[in-house]
Structures are given as C-alpha cells and as structure tokens.
Amino acid sequence: MTATARPGVPIEKVERAIFAELDKVASKGVTQAELDKVIKQARAQFVYAMDGVMNVGGWLGQLEMVASYKMYDTFLDNLMKVTRDDIRRVAEKYLRETNRTVGWFIPTNGSAPRARRGGHA
C-alpha cells in the first residue's frame, strides 16, 4: 500500500488511517459494491496494460516476481473468482500489524545535492 500526504498533513495521521482501514477489512470484510468496483478497475488496468510490448513485458516481470509469468494467461479468470470471503480471510491472515513493514519517504525540499551541468559533481 502507498499513500501520499498533502502538505501539512502529519504522516502519522495517514498511517493511522491506513491501518484502521486494514483492520476494518480484516474484521468486517468489504461490501459487494466495493469488490465489484475493484474488480472492474483491475480488469481495466490489466487490459489497458496490454497496449504495447513494454507493458506486457512489465506485467510478465511483475508476475514472475510474485509467482510465475504463467499467471498472465489466467489472471482475469482468477480475478473473477475472488470473493468477499477470500478478501477477509487473506486480510485477517496477512494484513496484521505483526506482518507490516512501514517506511516513510519525506522529501528534503531540494536540499539534496544536485548534479552540475557540463562537469563533474
């Protein structure tokens, strides 16, 4: 999961909101409308990503990192099999506080070293 905080919004507040939502999904699950919306979005992203060899290559690489590039052939079929109970069960098992690795990236507002043009830094 990722989130971007608006200027002035404490990162801790964003983190608490994410954790609260994860806990809610693990304890109560999602509604059918939420599941339908996510499946529709995921299908659209998958189909859109097939526009071009580079995009297909990116998908194959990501799938290989997760399990196997062979998932590409069955991705949409498997996506359509996901149920509300699956989401709750998986969230309950894997999205627990003890399984989280949290990192914050806080920009330095341009104070990082910059490369010089036409020479060595």
Image (cartoon, rainbow, N blue to C red):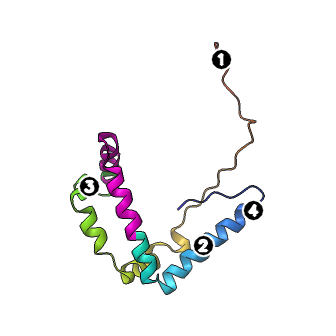
Q: Tell me the element at label 4.
A: loop
Does residue 114 appear to the left or right of 51 in the view shown? right
Q: Tell me the element at label 1.
A: loop
Question: Dot 3, crowdedness within 10 Å: few (<14), some or many (≥20)?
Answer: few
What is the chief secondary structure element of the magenta stretch?
A: helix
The x and y percentages for residue 94 are 45, 72
Disc 4 designates what residue? 10
Q: What amino acid type is highlighted by mark number 4? A: Pro
Disc 1 designates what residue? 117
- Magenta-drawn segment: 39-63
Asked where in the image residue 41 lies, by quadrant, the reply is: bottom left
First in sequence: mark 2 or mark 3? 2
Disc 2 designates what residue? 19
Q: Nearer the viewer, mark 3 or mark 4?
A: 4
Disc 3 versus disc 4: distance between alpha carbons? 39 Å
Which disc, if any, is residue 68?
Answer: 3
Where is the C terminus found, in terms of image quarters?
top right
Disc 3 versus disc 1: distance between alpha carbons? 43 Å
